[in-house]
Amino acid sequence: MRTLKLLVVLVVAITTTAFTIKSDGTGYKVGDVATDFSLMNIDGKMVSLADFTDARGFIVIFTCNTCPYAVAYEDRIEALNKKYADKGYPVVAIMPNDTDIKPGDNMEAMKARAKAKGFTFPYLMDEGQEIYPQYGATKTPHVYILQKEKEGNVVKYIGAIDDNYKDAAQVNTKYVENAVDALLDGKSIEVDQTRAIGCSIKVKS
């Protein structure tokens, strides 16, 4: 019995560590001001954060069609937008991969995927691969929660959506929801950075 308990504790510790160790990569850190962008949406229109005049902030998610991790999170990403868009924190999804390497992530594929899944959020293409390096995104999915403040869109959270990419029903900690809820309540975010778990962003060599 003691062995089983120790095993459970070890598994929990390993899982927690996998998500909560901070990355040493380049890009935005919590507290930095994120610059705006103008990227093509699946509807053919250019979209910027400035277009969301009523937003209080944003849930910016770098994601794609072809990564199994990103696919596993699609329904949860849609649920985030449905829960928080009307509260002032819409999801803005950005596809960062080079489509020569991943043709399944090209614009036509993005349109088809969005239609099939019924996405209600913008799904933008970082065609020149200029935006994801500014953020410091390395995975799909990789989340950046921004809050509108006097100085601009301030980064408040970076990392994973939650602590179980395999099974939504087995999630213990909803990092993004906890962070947005804290912002809505005017409270400090307890965990403001976690490690994104997903596929590496594909870059043309």
Image: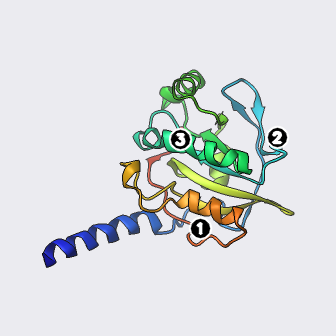
Q: For the residues marked 2 and 1, what is the alpha-carbon distance in whole angstroms?
A: 26 Å
Disc 1 residue type? Answer: Asp
Percent of width and height locating residue 117: 52, 29
Disc 2 residue type? Answer: Asp
- Is residue 172 in view from this perspective? yes
Q: Which residue carries the number 3 mark?
A: 203
- Residue at position x 40%, y 39% in the image: 68
Q: Residues within 10 Å of mark 2 (few under 14, many from 20)?
A: few
Secondary structure category for the residue under label 1: loop
- Is residue 26 in view from this perspective? no
Q: Earlier in the sequence, mark 3 or mark 2?
A: 2
In the image, farthest residue toward the right = 150
Percent of width and height locating residue 157: 62, 62
- Residue at position x 48%, y 31% in the image: 102
Q: Is the C-beta separation of discs 2 and 1 under 8 Å?
A: no
Which of discs 1 and 3 lies nearer the camera? The answer is 1
Disc 3 residue type? Answer: Val
